[in-house]
Image: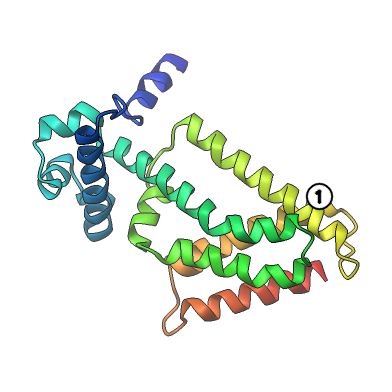
Amino acid sequence: MSDTRATDDLQLVPRKTAKQARAQLTVEAILEAGAQVFERLGYASATTNRIAERAGVSIGSLYQYFPSKDAILVALARRHLEEGMTLLAPQLQRLGDGEAWDTVLPDVVDAMVAMHAVAPMLHRCLFEETRLPKGLRDELEALEDALVDVTAKALTADPKRSPADTRLAARIVVNTIEGLTHRLVLRPLPEVDSERVAREITALVRAYVG
């Protein structure tokens, strides 16, 4: 079973790293094309042939770098993770610098909503329809743990917040923001915009930690 899983994971990672400028441009073109094809067609209808055509490269060139469409999705998921951290980093820095949790919370929620609102169909493909390799799952779990650490420290330092178990409260806060943002932005209710979603999530989390 473990050998089969290891073989399957090889289909989820790039075949080689692009080092030369021309190769990097090719990989970037494939990823950008993949993002567009998955966003427009969804997971089932997206194919490596369509992605290669959209990128303006031969299917052979695509397979030099990515063994499957899932490998392209995993690369896009990793890029999405990096972009998300770029959005969250300023808010986490504010918490690290001692700014009050209640002040920073709306901006944290806004950043999470913004991250999910860009190309929602692609986001669904990335995190609902693709089996992520263990390495990337480990990265996601490490990121969650880091967010919990920052949140727990901020809740402890805020005299207005006094949860009985700060660590548990912090994990519930992080998972609530992520889970609700994911569901309500990617599967929106009619006539409910992302700004309202952000306000409601913020109000819910404030009520819980208060």
Q: Residue at horizontal 50%, vertical 61%?
A: 182
| Closest to the observer, 22 or 35 | 22
* Outermost residue, top side: 3
Q: Is residue 111 visible?
A: yes
Q: How many marks?
A: 1
- In screen coordinates, is 46 left or right of 194? left
Q: Residues within 10 Å of mark 1 (few under 14, many from 20)?
A: some
Q: Position of residue 27 (x, y in %)?
A: 24, 38
Is 75 drawn above or below residue 96 in the view shown? above
Q: Is residue 67 visible?
A: no
Q: Position of residue 136 (x, y in %)?
A: 49, 35
Q: Position of residue 63 (x, y in %)?
A: 18, 29
- In screen coordinates, is 149 left or right of 197? right
Q: Quadrant of the N terminus?
A: top left
Q: Residue at horizontal 37%, vertical 39%?
A: 74
| Closest to the observer, 91 or 115 | 91
Q: Residue at horizontal 54%, vertical 81%?
A: 196
Amino acid marked by disc 1: Arg
Q: Quadrant of residue 202?
A: bottom right
Q: Secondary structure at mark 1?
A: helix
Is 167 drawn above or below residue 116 in the view shown? above
* Outermost residue, front side: 21
Q: Residue at horizontal 24%, vertical 35%?
A: 21
Q: How is the image coloured?
A: rainbow
Q: Position of residue 16 (x, y in %)?
A: 29, 24
Is 65 drawn above or below residue 168 in the view shown? above
Residue at the spot of label 1: 167
Q: Quadrant of residue 210?
A: bottom right
| Closest to the observer, 33 or 141 | 33
